[in-house]
Amino acid sequence: MTDAAPPGGRVLGVDYGSHRVGLAISDLLRMTAQPLEVISRPAAVERISELISDLDIREIVMGLPLGLSGREGPAARLARSFGTEITEATGLAVIFLDERFTTSTAESAMLSANVRRSRRRQSIDKVAAAVILQAFLDRSR
């Protein structure tokens, strides 16, 4: 949407879904991403606004759900619309990152860690947000 914020502060990772939104946060050095929480879509913009002020968040990275061909479809348009809502509420630009395969990567990581199915269902969105955020952090070095 616009240029990235100056260095410093944390980065928030967002995995958008029409019902749930997964959030992850970077450390202050912007080296690692940690899953943070899963919130309902209706409460997401308000909660993200709170986190920005509470945790010194300076950038927001959101997964963009592209089709296998790399084209944007209805899901990507909804994610971009949500990003606009976040920008309007917080004043921070949302940086979009291709999120193809992030949920399957998160699922594989949780399976490898022997996380139970019920726990995976509760956590998958925030783990996917951490995968998106870590990809961004790795590119930024």
Image (cartoon, rainbow, N blue to C red):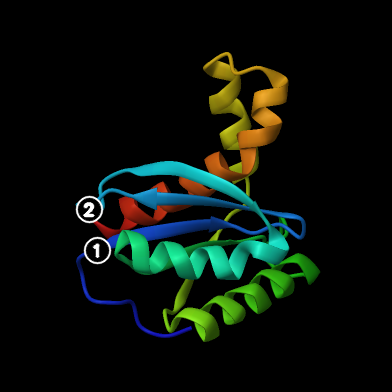
Measuring 80% from the left and 70% from the top, which residue is drawn there?
74
User: Can you give x and y, in whole percent of width and height, for residue 55 in the image?
Assistant: 33, 59
Question: Mark 1 falls on what kind of element?
Answer: loop
For this view, does 70 lie left or right of residue 98?
right
**Position of the C terminus by quadrant:** bottom left
For this view, does 94 lie left or right of residue 21?
left
Q: Nearer the viewer, residue 128 or 12?
A: 12
Contact, CB < 8 Å: mark 2 with mark 1?
A: yes
User: Eyeballing the image, is 80 above or below 35?
Assistant: below
Whole-number angstrom distance, CA of label 2 to CA of label 1 = 6 Å
Give the amino acid at mark 1.
Gly
User: Eyeballing the image, is 120 above or below 82?
Assistant: above
Instruction: In the rendered structure, find residue 67 and report the number of the disc placed on it.
Output: none
Measuring 57% from the left and 25% from the top, which residue is drawn there?
110
**On the image, numbered disc 1 is attached to which residue?**
9
What is the crowding at mark 1: few (fewer than 14 residues within 10 Å), some, or many (at least 20)? some
Instruction: In the rendered structure, find residue 28 and report the number of the disc placed on it.
Output: 2
